[in-house]
Amino acid sequence: MQTLSASSIRYLITMHSLSGERGMRCVDIARALHVTKPSVYRMMEALSDKALVQKEKYGMVFLTENGRELAVRYSAYYEIIFRFLCREFALPPEDAGNAVFALLAGISDERIGSMCEIMRDMS
């Protein structure tokens, strides 16, 4: 699996929640993430270079099959780890969310999967 930054993972998860089966506009992504449109355009270029998103001529952006698969997997990991951190460590939601993205970006997929299994068993 390719290495992604915490920011890239945050974009993929957000895009997945916005898109369903249809595409989305960069302005909608910017609004959801509270970032500027130029930031979204730069990230779309980076994700496009990794074949995770496809951009259309008139501004619509779509997750590729690989992008959607990663977004689904990261979303599942995010939910498990987020709930665990909030419940077990009483972290405020914003802190827990930031910690989850750092973990997802910094630890291998195999290890994250193992961690999530343990966290699931503990709940």
Image (tube, grey):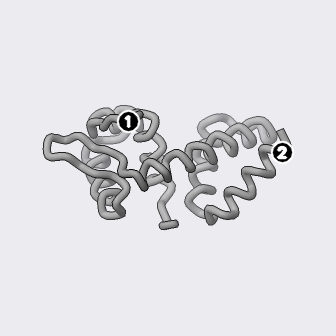
- Find residue 33 and report its image quarter: top left
Label 1: element kind? loop
Identify the residue at the far right of this view: 122
**Residue at horizontal 69 percent and vertical 42 percent from the top:** 80
Identify the residue at the far left of this view: 57
Q: Nearer the viewer, mark 1 or mark 2?
A: 1
**Residue at horizontal 52 percent and vertical 66 percent from the top:** 1
CA separation in Å, label 1 and label 2: 32 Å
Q: Percent from the top left, x then y, of residue 98?
A: 58, 46
- Label of residue 121 in the image: 2
Residue named by callout 1: 21
Question: Few, some or many C-alpha atoms within 10 Å of disc 1 (few <14, some 14-19, many ≥20)?
Answer: few
Q: Percent from the top left, x then y, of residue 102?
A: 59, 55
Which quadrant would the C terminus be assigned to in this image?
Answer: top right
Question: Few, some or many C-alpha atoms within 10 Å of disc 2 (few <14, some 14-19, many ≥20)?
Answer: few
Nearer to us in this view, 70 or 46: 70
Q: Percent from the top left, x then y, of residue 43?
A: 33, 53
Relative horizontal placement of residue 2, taking residue 109 as reference (left or right) = left
Of mark 1 and mark 2, the one earlier in the sequence is 1
Label 2: element kind? helix
Q: Percent from the top left, x then y, of residue 120?
A: 78, 44
**Residue at horizontal 44 percent and vertical 40 percent from the top:** 16
Q: Amino acid at mark 1?
A: Glu
Q: Amino acid at mark 2?
A: Asp
Nearer to us in this view, 14 or 110: 110
Nearer to us in this view, 52 or 106: 52
